[in-house]
Image: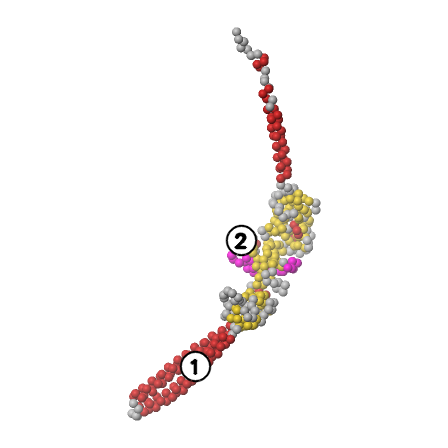
Amino acid sequence: MTDSKPSLDQLRIDRTGNKDSSPRYRTVIAILAVLPLLGLTAWWLIRPKPAVVHTIAASAGVTGGSAGPRTLLNASGYVTPRREATVSSKVTGKVVEVLIEEGMKVEAGQVLARIDSLNVEANLRLVEAQLQASRSSLEETKVRIEEAEREFRRATSLAEKQIATQADLDRAESEVKSLRARLDKQKADIAVAEREVAVWKQQLDDTVIRAPFTGVVTIKNAQPGEMISPMSSGGFTRTGICTIVDMSSLEVEVDVNESFINRVTAGQQVEATLDSYPEWKIPSKVIAIIPTADRQKATVKVRVGFEKLDSRILPQMGVKVAFHGSEQSSSAQSASVTVPKAAVRQDDGRNILWVARDGRVERRAVTVGRTIGEETSITAGLTSGEKVVVQGGENLKDGGKIKEANQ
């Protein structure tokens, strides 16, 4: 009988077939263990590093003193003249004389240049001679009318005495009427000739170019010998003699972002600062807000007028303007804090500071007071002791991490 129970040898596990798989298993385990370490190392190398900035704590401002104006908005623009003209001639011709230079002050009606007038003068002499001839013919006709009227009276008297015939009387009367009609025509011809003389005199006067208003010559466009024309005709033909600016009409044109135009009103006090004279504060005021917006730039044009003009103010100069609000109270003045001027930055026409707190920065809109030397007073938006970024704030983002360097 066959024994169906398995023997002990049959129940033993045969491990000879796993000899090759054991090293491979250990390699996989090792790779899986190293991967997290490699990922952690890569994250450490490419992790975003906090921006290194220099900070300083805001200090309490100086109390006391008179209240100052509150700045609502800062903007920039250019000095522009309200009255500016490129002076040209009314006729085409060759320039024979230019009597102005750049920087010269001219009065209204002053002669600036002259155009060749030989042809105009010749035509004027011709029409004046024709006018004189017409007047001479008129005098001759008047004499003939007097003679014809005497002949008509004589014929009438003879006809009454039955000496002259009716035909003689009719002929004398017709002669008088014919001469009178010729006289009327000659008077009309004289009137036409006088108009022609006036036209050519006006054309002669048009060859003399005069200043339309009192101002200063800023650009000289033409020289003697050049052709000038009121319309551009290509080639070497000029369209103007010079450019004149009325210096008494200088003002500032500012493009204000339409989001902040509600802070600007007509008559509002403005402090203007020329880029060429940064320490010179020029009192000004808003003249008008142009009632239309620029769709491309999303701005509204504002005209600002100087309260007092100065010879240092020149057209097309760059200028920065600060739109002021109401006077600050003495309590607000005493509550101001002082920060370095370099800490204040411009963003969309507003004054901002980067405030450092717990390793991050916060974008803070503030109200700027007066700037004295390298220090600026902050009247609203910042308290004493808060740290502000003075260096390294070019690429910061609101809420971004920072690392404060020793200041």
The residues bearing labels 1 and 2 have C-alpha atoms spaced at a distance of: 68 Å
Q: Residue at x 52, y 55 (%)?
A: 294
**Circle 2 — which element?**
loop
Does residue 262 show up?
no
Q: Nearer the viewer, mark 1 or mark 2?
A: 1
Q: Identify the magenta region.
A: 276-303
Task: Report whether 104 appears left or right of 181.
Answer: right
Q: Is residue 274 above or below residue 28?
A: below
List x then y, in percent, for residue 366: 62, 50
Q: Which mark is drawn over residue 134? A: 1
* Colour setting: secondary structure
Total residue callouts: 2
Badge 1 element: helix
> How would you rate the neighbour count of disc 1 (Cα within 10 Å): few for under 14, some for 14-19, many for 20 or more?
some
| The quadrant where residue 98 appears | bottom right
Specify the label residue 298 is tagged with. 2
